[in-house]
Image: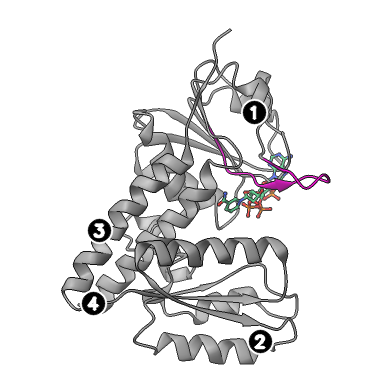
Amino acid sequence: MSQAKIIDGKVVSTKVRQEVKEEVEKLNQQGINVGLAVVIVGKDPASRIYVNSKKKACAEIGIYSEEYALDESITEQELLTLVEKLNHDTKINGILVQSPLPKHINENRIVEAISPLKDVDAFHAQNVGKIMIGDFDFLPCTPSGCIDLIESTGTEISGKNCVVIGRSNIVGKPMAMLLLHKNGTVTICHSKTRNLAEVCRQADILVAAVGVPNLVKKDMVKQDAVVIDVGMNRLEDGSLCGDVDFEGVSQVASYITPVPGGVGPMTIATLMKNTVTAAKIQSR
Ligand code: NAP
């Protein structure tokens, strides 16, 4: 029985981060500093881990970062005021508001208040529209990381059947769009898709971004497919698992990403890339 090769997100992301670090050094030599503001509201443990990883990446790469850790009770207006202040702060090139936000805050309103030039998550409608037409400044972080992982295997996306499971605004839809820009033939699946297994079996490249532990089983995967697992699911015992049954699917796929250590590190690496892009745009 064949065994899939593991796509190591730590190795691929280290390379990307090294390239970003060199760019930051070049910008610094031209007198341009790069800064990211990270805003976290409340005490969600997963958000805390993500924010810490992002700050750590900034420190390693030479990006200045500021953290705003706000109490759960902050009002929407107070948060909007902070975003507005950061929009005008010349030390800050990128603004990231960690989701989820408390229920009394309209997340969409906050995202739309971020200057599109500082929207390093690429969630602002203006940047989403630019991604749609294929003329964008900021890469959608997780999908772009997935493309890097696929290409790191030497797999040509052009002409391939690509199936994306999940249609969220932050992963599924932009993922499908990036694959389309790379000339993949793309199908998007979701909770209402009929015969999910049958659709998935057509995929040369299968991306799972669902949030259901081990949803994708061996019998849903074509022989030698490239499988990218975006899922990050916390099990009752505290361990992390993806949307793909790693053991089973490894027996049929040619390449597969592990969870953790696959897509996650790439999301952060792309965020760093975007922050540098933001600094460049703002220095023009
Ligand atoms: P989301 O907003 O909850 O979207 C999940 C999508 O999966 C929806 O489109 C939903 O369909 C679909 N879905 C749910 N159950 C399904 C089923 N049984 N069959 C087929 N489709 C189904 O989640 P998300 O924000 O996109 O995140 C997805 C996963 O990726 C989560 O585990 C999240 O933690 C992880 N994630 C990881 C990273 C990273 O950096 N590694 C970044 C972001 C997210 P409907 O639209 O019909 O409801």
Q: Callout 3, which amino acid?
A: Glu
Identify the secondary structure beneath mark 3. helix
User: Which-is-in-front pick, marks 2 and 1?
Assistant: 1
User: Which-is-in-front pick, marks 2 and 4?
Assistant: 4
| Residue that carries the numbered disc 2 in the rendered image | 76
Left or right for 42, reference 150: right
Image mark count: 4
How far apart, in angstroms, are the residues tagged by discs 4 and 1?
44 Å
How far apart, in angstroms, are the residues tagged by discs 2 and 4?
33 Å
Is residue 21 rendered magenta in the image? no
Q: Quadrant of the N terminus?
A: top right
Specify few, some or many for label 4: CA neighbours under 10 Å numbering under 14, 14-19, or 20 or more. some
| Residue that carries the numbered disc 3 in the rendered image | 22
- Picture quarter containing residue 196? top right
Kindly identify the residue that appears in the image at 66 percent across and 87 percent down. 76
Q: Callout 2, which amino acid?
A: Glu
Q: Callout 1, which amino acid?
A: Phe
Left or right for 15, reference 236: left
| Residue that carries the numbered disc 1 in the rendered image | 246
How far apart, in angstroms, are the residues tagged by discs 3 and 4?
13 Å
| Residue that carries the numbered disc 4 in the rendered image | 32
Q: Nearer the viewer, residue 48 or 116?
A: 48
Q: Callout 4, which amino acid?
A: Ile
**Span colored in magenta:** 227-241
Kindly identify the residue that appears in the image at 82 percent across and 44 percent down. 237
